[in-house]
Image (cartoon, coloured by chain):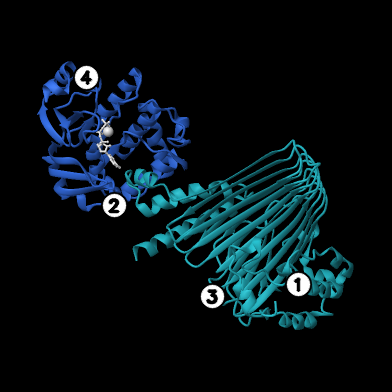
């Protein structure tokens, strides 16, 4: 572990001591845990498909505020509020809290802790070096608490933008809480320029009885970025959490969902689409844990790897001894466009109860040449034919995005990715 | 005027010669039928006209309205006015019949320099065509051919043909697997496509279709060649005596 650049992070933590009430001890503990654990290596089983050599080669500094403000894209659809973080710093001017503040608690994490230091106790510490580092170095994020019974219809968009942050990182932390019967959708977007930065995002949520949280992620980081994101979610009885991701950006990207079903009839959905072009790797790791009876989980993943692209999915489901009547399904399908494209799948079921319905399926294949011929024999050009088949292939994994405009925007991005492939094929 | 002109066509599939020197000329306004033993190369010929890329033309030419058809991609051939009704239509999960038809029609229109058809106009057209071919309109919303019965798939091919309105329709055993009523409906669809400015090439095993759609010329294909051509009475003769005695 000597070769690991640890000391650099120590001084970064030092610099943050005293900046955010209630977090000093937590930072110190997390740093200690981080140093004890060390970054994953090529041998770390859960990380074997991710190329994170960059983490071991350099110390990523804390990203400074942007010198020039980038032009922000429009929201993906109708929003009830928009949070903008540029280089991990809350951008008040470009954010818009709408009138949500009247019914729910919604504010930047830094402001929140200034007023409520004790709330820092609720921060999840993490479970590996990368999440510990997030805890040790967090500066800001979104705090959203939706009181019981409050329903927010339009999504809250959280836009992360990285610019001019070569060799720098942002460790952003979002804390979401839904009271009983509350309902909300958070759309996280990740964007950035071509610099070699690191986004290390952590989303923690608590979904109370009968509440329903949708968590949409649209990852379009810059081409040289490292993206690591985690969601830690606890769901009470009859509550539901729906995560739908689209991963297209970055050089190396990984998303982890750690979801615990803590009450009967709680429901977890972890769906996603990942599209890997040459040199990219997109990695998804999910761990859904059924601890009580009669909860359900369902995961639909569709990935596509172009030449020299790589996608991986590892889905772990654990069903505790008492968790009878559990229903857990997992469907993973990958397309590879040629022999140099790679798709990995690793389902892992640990079932200790006996009366459960669990299923999983994983397939890897190519686009159906017969179907392409059939479409072209009706006048459709080959690029459009492929695009149609890819849209059909990915549709099931986007189906559970609750906002139609966001879903359409995600589908558009898949189309655009396919268009870029065929332009390249022609050139 | 000659619409399709095939000269000395040789086609190989997986390095095996299947079509072995075939000549065929079809004029506008004509209906031709090709009959022949299983494995004679009828579908290979049909797919070569449509441009399937794993079928290699090793010799010969195909001209369509004077243009070199072999130089065109499959989708361009459709733009020029060719349609192939498949012997085995393909299932495409996740793509709705409507989306498929609309994308196809607008692709062909763009190829011909026309504007896209509006959604309302398109729906009207498709509903009318489905009704003519007695296809349940609910099937338009389903995924292309997925879970369709054999006969429903063939009817779906006919709907596609009539929406795209080709100059030359090559129908590969569109009559196989149809019940008697469906056969009559499909035959009516083919007859509706029969005009002075269109041509039809029917590939069939059965005289029954030809009693509804009377061909101008009947060809007998054996082992990659057309060995005999004649009038519609040739089909009756084949049905009576079999291929061995006729050809
Ligand atoms: N992809 C392929 N690979 C190898 N052989 C093929 C391939 N496609 C067709 N063939 C062979 O070519 C020959 C002609 O096939 P084709 O489908 O054209 O016959 P057909 O006349 O349409 O027969 P049928 O009346 O049974 O439909 C057959 O022997 C078939 O096995
Ligand atoms: Mg055939």
* Gap in angstroms between the C-alphas marked 2 and 4: 38 Å
Residue B117 shows up from this direction = no
Mark 1 or mark 4: which is in front? 1
Q: Residue at x 23, y 48 (%)?
A: B56
Chain A drawing hue: cyan
Locate residue A102, reporting x and y percent: 80, 59
Q: In the picture, which quadrant includes the C terminus of chain B?
A: top left
| Residue bearing the label numbered 4 | B211
Badge 4 crowding class, 10 Å Cα cut-off, few under 14, some 14 to 19, many 20 or more, is few
Residue B92 lies left or right of residue A320; in this view the side is left
Comparing labels 2 and 4, the label whose residue is closer to the camera? 4
Q: Which residue is mark 1?
A: A34
Label 1 with label 3: CB-CB less than 8 Å:
no
Which is nearer the N-term, disc 1 or disc 3? 1
Q: Which residue is mark 3?
A: A194
Residues tagged by mark 1 and mark 3 found on one chain of the structure? yes
């Amino acid at each position: 572990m000597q070769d690991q650049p640890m000391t650099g992070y120590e001084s970064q933590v030092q610099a943050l001591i005293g900046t955010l009430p209630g977090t000093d001890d937590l930072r110190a503990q997390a740093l200690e845990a981080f140093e004890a654990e060390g970054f994953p290596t090529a041998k770390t089983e859960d990380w074997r498909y991710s190329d994170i050599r960059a983490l071991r080669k350099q110390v990523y500094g804390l990203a400074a505020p942007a010198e020039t403000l980038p032009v922000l894209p429009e929201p993906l659809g109708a929003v009830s509020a928009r949070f903008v973080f540029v280089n991990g710093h809350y951008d008040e001017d470009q954010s818009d809290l709408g009138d949500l503040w009247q019914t729910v608690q919604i504010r930047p994490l830094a402001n929140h802790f200034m007023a409520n230091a004790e709330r820092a106790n609720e921060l999840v510490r993490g479970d590996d070096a990368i999440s510990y580092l997030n805890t040790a170095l967090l500066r800001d994020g979104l705090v959203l608490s939706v009181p019981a019974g409050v329903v927010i219809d339009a999504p809250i968009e959280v836009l992360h933008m990285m610019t001019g942050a070569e060799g720098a990182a942002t460790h952003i932390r979002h804390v979401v809480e839904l009271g009983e019967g509350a309902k909300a959708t958070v759309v996280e977007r990740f964007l950035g320029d071509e610099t070699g930065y690191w986004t290390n995002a952590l989303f923690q949520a608590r979904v109370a009885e009968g509440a329903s949280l949708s968590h949409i992620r649209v990852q379009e980081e810059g081409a040289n970025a490292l993206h690591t994101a985690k969601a830690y979610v606890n769901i009470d009885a009859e509550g539901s959490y729906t995560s739908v991701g689209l991963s297209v950006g970055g050089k190396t990207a990984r998303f982890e969902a750690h979801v615990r079903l803590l009450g009967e009839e709680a429901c977890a959905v972890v769906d996603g689409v990942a599209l890997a072009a040459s040199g990219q790797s997109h990695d998804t790791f999910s761990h859904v844990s059924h601890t009580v009876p009669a909860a359900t989980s369902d995961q639909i993943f569709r990935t596509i790897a172009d030449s020299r692209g790589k996608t991986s999915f590892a889905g772990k489901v654990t069903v505790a001894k008492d968790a009878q009547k559990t229903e857990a399904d997992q469907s993973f399908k990958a397309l590879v466009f040629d022999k140099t494209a790679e798709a990995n799948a690793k389902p892992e079921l640990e079932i200790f109860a006996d009366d459960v319905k669990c299923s999983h399926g994983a397939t890897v294949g190519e686009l159906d040449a017969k179907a392409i011929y059939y479409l072209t024999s009706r006048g459709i050009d080959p690029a459009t034919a492929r695009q149609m088949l890819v849209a059909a292939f990915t549709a099931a994994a986007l189906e559970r995005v609750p906002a139609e405009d966001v879903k359409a925007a995600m589908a558009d991005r898949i189309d655009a990715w396919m268009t870029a492939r065929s332009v390249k094929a022609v050139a | 005027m000659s619409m399709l002109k095939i000269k000395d066509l040789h086609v190989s599939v997986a390095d095996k010669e299947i079509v072995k020197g075939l000549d065929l000329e079809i004029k506008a306004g004509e209906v031709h039928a090709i009959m022949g033993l299983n494995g004679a190369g009828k579908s290979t010929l049909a797919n070569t006209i449509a441009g399937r890329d794993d079928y290699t033309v090793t010799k010969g030419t195909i001209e369509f309205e004077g243009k070199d058809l072999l130089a065109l991609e499959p989708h361009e051939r459709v733009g020029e006015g060719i349609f192939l009704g498949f012997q085995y239509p393909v299932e495409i999960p996740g793509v709705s019949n409507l989306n498929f038809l609309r994308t196809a029609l607008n692709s062909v229109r763009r190829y011909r320099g026309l504007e896209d058809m509006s959604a309302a106009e398109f729906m009207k057209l498709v509903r009318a065509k489905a009704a003519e071919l007695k296809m349940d309109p609910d099937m338009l919303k389903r995924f292309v051919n997925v879970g369709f019965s054999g006969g429903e798939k063939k009817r779906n091919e006919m709907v596609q043909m009539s929406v795209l309105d080709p100059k030359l329709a090559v129908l590969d055993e569109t009559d196989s697997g149809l019940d008697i009523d469906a056969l009559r409906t499909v035959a009516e669809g083919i007859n509706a496509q029969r005009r002075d400015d269109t041509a039809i090439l029917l590939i069939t095993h059965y005289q029954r279709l030809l009693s509804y759609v009377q061909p101008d010329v009947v060809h007998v294909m054996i082992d990659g060649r057309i060995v005999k051509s004649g009038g519609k009475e040739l089909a009756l003769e084949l049905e009576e005596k079999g291929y061995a005695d006729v050809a």
